[in-house]
Amino acid sequence: MKNLLHTSLFTILLYGLVCLFAYPQFVISAETTHNQKINQENKASFDLTSVNASTNLVKKLAHEKSSQLADSFIKSRQHYNNDIDLNHTTTSDPLNYQRAVFKQNFSAVLSHFESKVFFALAEFRMNVEMASAVFFENTNFRWANFQSGLNLSLSRFKE
């Protein structure tokens, strides 16, 4: 009976010492984890802000580039259209005059159509470039969050 009492007291004392030394370590670990989580959230919000800023920049640059390309294309077509001059055709030859008018009108319609198609393709290219940039930015952002979460989980597991 005496041995049982000594064993019980020793067990309670040992349990008390473990709790006394382990509890502060547990509190410190919990505070550290909480601080790491706050830092991670702050970093995530900063990363999201930078993703939005870079997305807007890509959008703006792609739109400017597509507008410049479309403008240069339209100017080159207008230059070609100006080469067809109705003043050089004689009005004495009505068939030749009608051919020149038709050619000029057809060329104008064609250049308008081509410029619309070209601008639509440029816009499509801009949207694809922007979408791919956003996709890769988001993928990198998610991968960074996954890695930081994995590192946090591993550090908790090691403790």
Image (cartoon, helix red, strand yellow):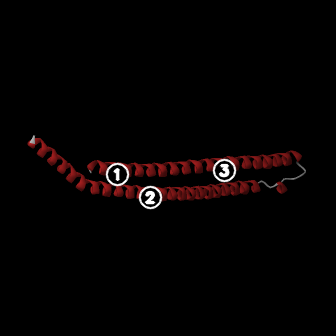
Could you say where residue 100 lies in the image, as x and y percent from the top left?
81, 49
Q: Nearer the viewer, residue 47 or 91?
A: 47
Q: Which residue is mark 1?
A: 152
Q: Which residue is mark 3?
A: 119
Around disc 2, counting alpha carbons within 10 Å, would you say few (fewer than 14), some (14 to 19), or many (20 or more)? few
The three-letter amino acid code for the residue at tag 3 is Phe
- Dot 2 falls on a residue whose secondary structure is helix
- Distance CA(mark 3)–CA(mark 2): 39 Å
Determine the image quadrant of residue 69.
bottom right
The three-letter amino acid code for the residue at tag 1 is Leu
- Distance CA(mark 1)–CA(mark 3): 49 Å
Q: Which residue is mark 2?
A: 43
Could you say where residue 14 lies in the image, as x and y percent from the top left?
17, 50
- Dot 3 falls on a residue whose secondary structure is helix
Tell me whether circle 2 and circle 1 mark residues in contact (CB < 8 Å). Answer: no
Q: Residue at x 29, y 54 (%)?
A: 26
User: Horizontal placement of 90 versus 31: left or right?
Assistant: right
Question: Residue 63: which disc?
Answer: none
Number of numbered discs on residues:
3
- Dot 1 falls on a residue whose secondary structure is helix
Tell me whether circle 3 and circle 2 mark residues in contact (CB < 8 Å). Answer: no
Tell me whether circle 1 and circle 3 mark residues in contact (CB < 8 Å). Answer: no
